[in-house]
Amino acid sequence: MKTIIDKISLFILASAIVFVASGCSDDNKSDLQLDGDTWISSFTLDDNYSGVIDRTAKTITVGVPEVYDTDAMTVTAIEFSDGAKASVKIGDVLNFSFPQVIKITNSDVFMDYTVNIKHDEAKILTFKLNDVYAGVIDHTKRSITVRVPGSVDVKNLVPVITTSDGAVVTPASGLAADFTDPVDFTVTYNTASAVYTVTVIPTDAPSAVYVGLAASIDLLNAEEKEAATWMLNNIANSQYISFEDVQAGRVDLSECKIMWWHLHIDGGIDTMTKFDAAAPAAVNALVKMKELYNNGMNLLLTRYATFYGAKIGATLDGNNPNNCWGQSEETGEITGGPWSFSMKGHEDHPLYQNLVMVNGETSNVYTCDTGYRITNSTAQWHIGSDWGGYANNEIWRQKTGGVDLGYGGDGAVVAWEYLPADTKGGIVCIGSGCYDWYAFGVDVSADKYHGNVARMTENAINYLMSK
């Protein structure tokens, strides 16, 4: 029987080899036609606005005036490869308030081009004095605030300015000026213009600081920069400093009562090892930071900066938040509805005063509305006997020394504090994924709940400064 089976197997194998060999014959060719070009060579909207075509990126950028309605623009010219077809034609009216895609097809080949509208803009992007003292820019108010040491001669300072592409600024970058009084800088580009008022404030001892990993506020990532800029524009006598500044003792902190650190890492971190790798400057400054905290410095730690509570010895069991994750800014989730976390049982805490509330919901903190792009960066404490080491909230309090203030949907602790003890300062921590400052590519000006992020932060700062 075995011999017969072996012979049958050999016959099947030989037949398969013959079939494969015949299938590889040069006589069998694909019917696909792949030799057609799919290039767009010109594209114009509303007769006057021609697109700049980037064949590598497959994009078309159309420049329009600073104030121009792009909701209904007409395709008035489009040229593309011979023999090809386009998904739009001359005379089509499209809404270019968001990117539109044009498909060029030639036989069995196609290519998509993304059309973006670029309004003329005139902005000051960075502003430094003597290439050392960085300004805090508020584009809404068109104001720039620069804090300098009291020993600096404000009558002879040299501005170093960068602007949006193609814009010209007057007075020019590099020309010394007297900043005893506020100085206006005018920026122009095509149809766009703006006047920024620069105010220089001599100060030696800040009352509050935002501490970060970067050497200057301009070098922070977008999420952190949004938070730091808000603080310097809204908290009196506040200043940006780096952890290296703290370690080297470059800043007089004798009058400082509160330090805020908001740490964002694209993709999130979930272990102390990852924290150490992401924030080496904060780890290097640990001795000085412990000294400040043990001598009464108050801290506001938000997002992944909440890990620092364990670093400086505020967490009794030495643990960091045990349930953490996050997304990246450019690919963050678009919310399908308002996001919130619970403050149930703590509605009267100073952290939650004067927030915009939803009718009938007295125990929920809303921080963004539908359409917000959020990374959902979370650093929370999972509570439960299933995993994490904290069977219930009381055991979490006993082991960590923390006081829970806010909760996620599954009961996780997302906001908490460590109360002052002996000479030590107080710490407020916010690790909720709802606590988010920056939404990539989304205009948040009309978001009715997003202002609660700033209000809650101001509440926390005022609460800690009162300690």
Image (cartoon, helix red, strand yellow):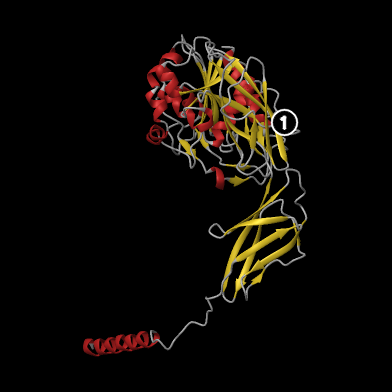
Residue 411 in view of the camera: no
Q: Amino acid at mark 1?
A: Met
The 10 Å Cα crowd at callout 1, few under 14, some 14 to 19, many 20 or more, is some
Percent x, y for residue 225? 56, 31
Residue that numbered label 1 is attached to: 357
152 with respect to 370 (left or right)? left
SS label for mark 1: loop
Q: Nearer the viewer, residue 80 or 110?
A: 80
Task: Pick the quarter of the image with the C terminus.
Answer: top right
Q: How many labels were placed on the picture?
A: 1
Q: Please tell me whether residue 309 is drawn above or below residue 93 in the rendered image.
A: above
Percent x, y for residue 192? 71, 40
Q: Where is residue 409, by image quadrant?
A: top right
89 with respect to 126 (left or right)? right
Residue farthest front in this picture: 175
Residue at image position (52%, 44%) is 328
418 with respect to 349 (left or right)? left
Percent x, y for residue 270? 44, 37
Q: Where is residue 344, by image quadrant?
A: top right
Task: Pick the quarter of the image with the N terminus.
Answer: bottom left
Q: Please tell me whether residue 88 is drawn above or below residue 189 in the rendered image.
A: below
Residue at image position (60%, 23%) is 232
Q: Please tell me whether residue 400 is drawn above or below residue 20 in the rendered image.
A: above
Residue 254 in view of the camera: yes
Q: Nearer the viewer, residue 67 or 417?
A: 67
Percent x, y for residue 418? 50, 20
